[in-house]
């Protein structure tokens, strides 16, 4: 069974740092682009960052550029999101998502259950 | 930056009836458009990609249409399990990015 399992969320003070992890199973992890998507309480979805299968290329939303770093360890089938200089507006459920490429179109076909990050003093 | 706008924000429909949800892009996204369903307390799940192709296991009552800037998700005969929030999402090739609409809540009338 294809599965993504996030961990690492919690309560953190503004300005603090947190690292999220996403353990993947059931597919050849290093073959796929992976992303982080977040959802603030009661709000919609916001793509945060993506990383190529090799880990060489990374992409970020403007809202997190320079503060968040996405990485992956293909030997451990694990995706990471290092979050620094956290702000109250970063409070959200963070999902990891597996890329789906049809040959023409992209989408996220597998999502984790999410991990909650609360930035508050 | 491409902005995705969904309408209406909330749609009230009776079980067995048809629901039509709209998504508009601020500039052409060709057919790089996906639809997701999210139920309370759950992660989103993929319904449609490439604007009109159903994802694996998605019932035929879900259909997507459109290209360019105007897109529609139609649910032909609503079942109880279809009441949820629906999001459209575009994918931009370069620089790679994804943008979601703000969502449409489909509720029981």
Image: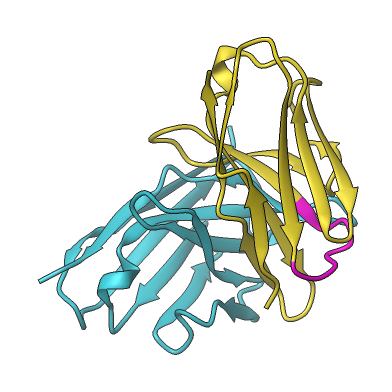
Chain colours: A cyan, B yellow
Q: Is residue B70 visible?
A: yes
Q: Quadrant of residue B25?
A: bottom right
The image shows residue A69 at horizontal and vertical percentages of: 45, 79
Instruction: Give the residue drawn at x 88%, y 48%.
Output: B66
Say if B6 sits above or below B45 in the image: below
Q: Is residue A12 above or below residue B57?
A: below
| Quadrant of the image occupied by residue B41 | top left
| A66 over B96 or under it: above or below | below
Viewport quadrant of the C terminus of chain A: bottom left
Where does residue B54 sit, x and y in percent of width and height? 80, 34
Q: Nearer the viewer, residue A102 or B42?
A: B42
Q: Is residue B27 magenta?
A: yes
Q: Position of residue A111 (x, y in %)?
A: 54, 45
x 61%, y 71%: residue: A51
Q: Is residue A75 toward the left or the right of residue A87 in the image?
A: right
Who is closer to the viewer here, A78 or A4?
A4
Q: Which quadrant: the N terminus of chain A?
A: top right
Q: Outermost residue toward the left?
A: A121
Could you tell me what secondary structure mostly forms the magenta stretch?
loop
Mark yes or no: residue A28 visible. no
Residue found farthest to the top: B16
* The magenta stretch spans residue B109: no
In the rendered structure, which segment of residues is drawn in magenta?
A: B26-33
Q: Looking at the image, which residue is at 61% across and 75% down?
A: A55
Q: Give how far across and how far down residue B10 sits, in percent.
A: 54, 38
Residue that appears at 32% across and 71% down: A89
């Amino acid at each position: 069974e294809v599965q993504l399992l996030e961990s690492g969320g919690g309560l953190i003070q503004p300005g603090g740092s947190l690292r999220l992890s996403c353990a993947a199973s059931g597919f050849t992890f290093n073959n796929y682009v992976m992303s982080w998507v977040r959802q603030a309480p009661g709000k919609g979805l916001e793509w945060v960052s993506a990383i190529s299968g090799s880990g060489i290329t990374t992409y970020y939303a403007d809202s997190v550029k320079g503060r968040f770093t996405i990485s992956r360890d293909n030997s451990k089938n694990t995706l990471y999101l290092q979050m620094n200089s956290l702000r109250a507006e970063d409070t959200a459920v963070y999902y990891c998502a597996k890329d789906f490429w049809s040959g023409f179109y992209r989408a996220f076909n597998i999502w984790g259950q999410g991990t909650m990050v609360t930035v508050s003093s | 930056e491409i902005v995705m706008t969904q309408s209406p924000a909330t749609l009230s429909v009776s079980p067995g009836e048809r629901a039509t949800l709209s998504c508009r892009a601020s500039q052409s996204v060709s057919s790089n458009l996906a639809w997701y369903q999210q139920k309370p307390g759950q992660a989103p799940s993929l319904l449609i990609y490439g604007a009109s192709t159903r994802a694996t296991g998605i019932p035929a009552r879900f259909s997507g249409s459109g290209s360019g800037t105007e897109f529609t998700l139609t649910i032909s005969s609503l079942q109880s399990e279809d009441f949820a929030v629906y999001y459209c999402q575009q994918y931009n090739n370069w620089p790679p990015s994804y943008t979601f609409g703000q969502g449409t809540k489909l509720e029981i009338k």
